[in-house]
Image (tube, grey):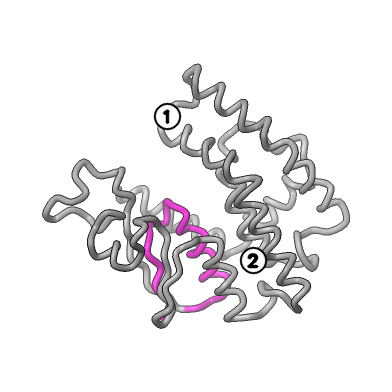
Amino acid sequence: MLTIYGVYCSRASRNYWMAEELGIPFQSVPVIQARLLADPLAAGARINTKSPAFLAVNPMGLIPAIDDDGLVLAESLANNLYLARKHGGPLAGADVREEGEMTAWTLWAATEVEPYTVKIVLTYDNARENTPDGKALIEACVKGLERPLTRLEAHLQTQDYVVGNRFTVADLNLAEVLRYAMDVPGVFDTYPRVKGWIARCHARPAFEKMMAGRKKEAQAA
């Protein structure tokens, strides 16, 4: 069975969404970020990214990680590419060409988009969005997103999804990276094709189930 290490309110959300899309059984080990605990190494502390038990899984101390019948992987976007390839179906590449495109879009999301979106989400998570420094950082990140969003907008002019004109792992990975920017009011308003694509991705039952997991987790915190 697939084991996913990480709380829903982390990059592990990508792997939980993927598992739901595939309809495969999985076990969740809710490893929390050590930075959220006063003393992550205290006796009785929740399992976290500094816990010896988790460091035995991922020595880098980062979530998520997955263990799939003994294969341990610890990069959220790569985890999803692996799961798509293993389980096949419409989320996976139909041929090597599509696999190449899905890998390229995933790496593009990680290198060209996430450096901006993760700064945005952390600014909001730390309640700094209305401070002078926070406002300046968000403005700079939104400016930095203009070029990649313009490219994605153009790509979606002739198709509803990123690869093969169907929802695939590439859409899931990219939509999750872009979700980090959604707290910024109107951030996608000048990119109607991107905005519509995000809405289609987020209307999927598997996404809604993952988000319900995040909500339940946040309420229990």
Q: Nearer the viewer, residue 73 or 197?
A: 73
Q: Residue 12's spot in the image, x, y percent? A: 45, 59
Taking the view exactly as shown, the residue that stands out farthest to the left is: 43
> Label for residue 127?
1
Q: Residue 44's spot in the image, x, y percent? A: 13, 55
| Residue beneath the point at 73% across and 36% down | 146
Instruction: Please identify the quarter of the rendering in which residue 2 is found.
Output: bottom left
Q: Residue 111's spot in the image, x, y percent? A: 62, 49
- Distance between the Cα atoms at labels 2 and 1? 32 Å
Taking the view exactly as shown, the residue that stands out farthest to the right is: 158
Q: Is residue 123 left or right of residue 198?
A: left
Dot 1 amino acid type: Ala
- Quadrant where the image shows the N terminus: bottom left
Residue 8 position (above or below residue 150): below
Q: Earlier in the sequence, mark 2 or mark 1?
A: 1
Q: Nearer the viewer, residue 185 or 163?
A: 163
Residue 133 position (above or below residue 177): above
Label 2 Cα neighbours within 10 Å, binned few <14 / some 14-19 / many ≥20: many
Q: Is residue 15 left or right of residue 92?
A: left
Q: Is residue 10 left or right of residue 14?
A: left
Instruction: Please identify the quarter of the rendering in which residue 203 is found.
Output: bottom right
> Label for residue 169?
2
Residue 78 position (above or below residue 118): below
What element does badge 1 sit on? loop
Please state the extent of the stretch shown in magenta in the rendering. Answer: 1-24
Q: Residue 108's spot in the image, x, y percent? A: 67, 53
Q: Is residue 89 left or right of residue 164?
A: left
| Residue beneath the point at 77% across and 48% down | 152
Taking the view exactly as shown, the residue that stands out farthest to the front is: 59
| Residue beneath the point at 67% across and 74% down | 92
Residue 21 position (above or below residue 181): below
Count of marks overlaid on the render? 2
